[in-house]
Amino acid sequence: MWRSKHFLIFLSLFAVTVFGIWSKFYTGVGREWLNNSFGGVLYEILWCLFFFAFFPRKKAIAAIAVSVFVGTCALEFLQLVKTPWLDAIRATLIGRLLLGTTFVPSDFIYYAIGSFLGWLWMLSIEKSMNRRR
């Protein structure tokens, strides 16, 4: 079981989630960057791994990384839209974590980095499974 692809994916999801939550509450040196900007990298990796859990094929890896990047860029642009129902969602913790609250153009850089690292992470899981066969 501990050698299965899904186990590695879920272990990775757990690690990225814990690190992501920790990064939101970190108070040390560089906290402004770690709390805000670096979270975009982890957010992309998390979504890549999430979708990889449902589509764990090598063929899907590039499509997942690109789709996650495009989707999170769309969510970033959605932050420019202010409506009562979106603001109500953003008022919750899960809404802030999933949708964000403020449009920040530099986030696109972190999304690109995160999608690239997510792509590499998925490839490394795939390669580790091939080595075991």
Image (cartoon, grey):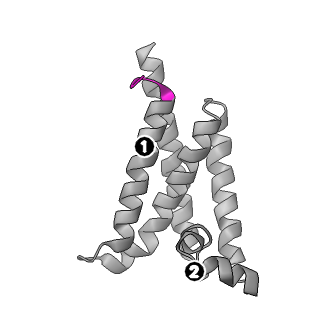
Task: Please report the residue visible at 48 percent of the width from the left and 50 percent of the height from the top.
Answer: 117
Task: Please report the residue visible at 68 percent of the width from the left and 43 percent of the height from the top.
Answer: 63
| Residue nearest the viewer, comparing 43 with 109 | 43
Numbered mark located on residue 12 in the image: 1
Q: Height in image: 13 above or below 82?
A: above
Task: Please report the residue visible at 71 percent of the width from the left and 75 percent of the height from the top.
Answer: 78
Taking 50 as reference, is 24 left or right?
left
Numbered mark located on residue 120 in the image: none
Q: Height in image: 29 above or below 130?
A: below
Taking the image as drawn, is residue 123 in sight? yes
Q: Nearer the viewer, mark 2 or mark 1?
A: 1
Q: What amino acid is labelled 1 in the image?
A: Ser
Q: Height in image: 80 above or below 61?
A: below
Taking 62 as reference, is 114 left or right?
left
Give the CA distance from mark 2 to mark 1. Answer: 27 Å
Secondary element type, mark 2 = loop
Displayed quadrant of residue 77 = bottom right
The kind of secondary structure the magenta stretch mainly shows is loop
The 10 Å Cα crowd at callout 2, few under 14, some 14 to 19, many 20 or more, is few
Secondary element type, mark 1 = helix
Q: What amino acid is labelled 2 in the image?
A: Val
N-terminal label among 2 and 1: 1
Q: Is residue 31 magenta?
A: no
Q: Which residue is mark 2?
A: 104
Displayed quadrant of residue 85 = bottom right
Looking at the rendering, the stretch of residues picked out in magenta corresponds to 1-5
